[in-house]
Image: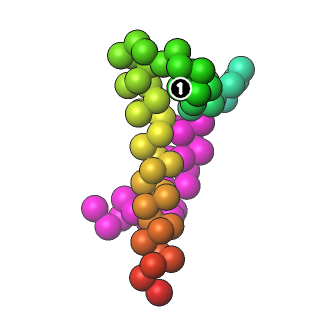
Amino acid sequence: MKNLLEYQFLIPIVLLLGFAPFYPQPHIVEKIRMLAAGTLNKPIDIFDLAWHAWPFLLLAYRISRDLTHT
């Protein structure tokens, strides 16, 4: 599990999975806009938001852990 939290692993995962597909706009951007507009109600859309958001959450956890454990 420790290797999964290394920056060499996390940053490519965030860039590839978090922002996929790159064109016309990343799914994470589309789903966040849907969430803000209140139209995120289909289960597949909720799953898609979770699928594209977990790399960002894991990276945020790693950064916060590094900042608090100095």
Can you identify the residue that label 1 sits on? 35
- Residue under the image location 42 percent in, 72 percent down: 65
Residues 10 and 29: in front is 29
Q: Amino acid at mark 1?
A: Leu
- Please tell me how crowded label 1 is: few (under 14), some (14-19), or many (20+) other residues with Cα within 10 Å: some
Q: Position of residue 26 (x, y in %)?
A: 63, 29
Which is the main secondary structure of the residues drawn in magenta? helix
**Magenta highlight on residue 7:** yes
42 left or right, relative to 31: left
12 left or right, relative to 43: right
Q: Is residue 4 visible?
A: yes
Q: Quadrant of the N terminus?
A: bottom left
**Residue lying at the far left of the rendered structure:** 1
- Residue under the image location 58 percent in, 27 percent down: 36
Q: Position of residue 44 (x, y in %)?
A: 39, 16
Query: Where 6 falls versus 54 (above or below)?
Result: below
Task: Give the magenta range.
Answer: 1-20
- Residue under the image location 51 percent in, 38 percent down: 17
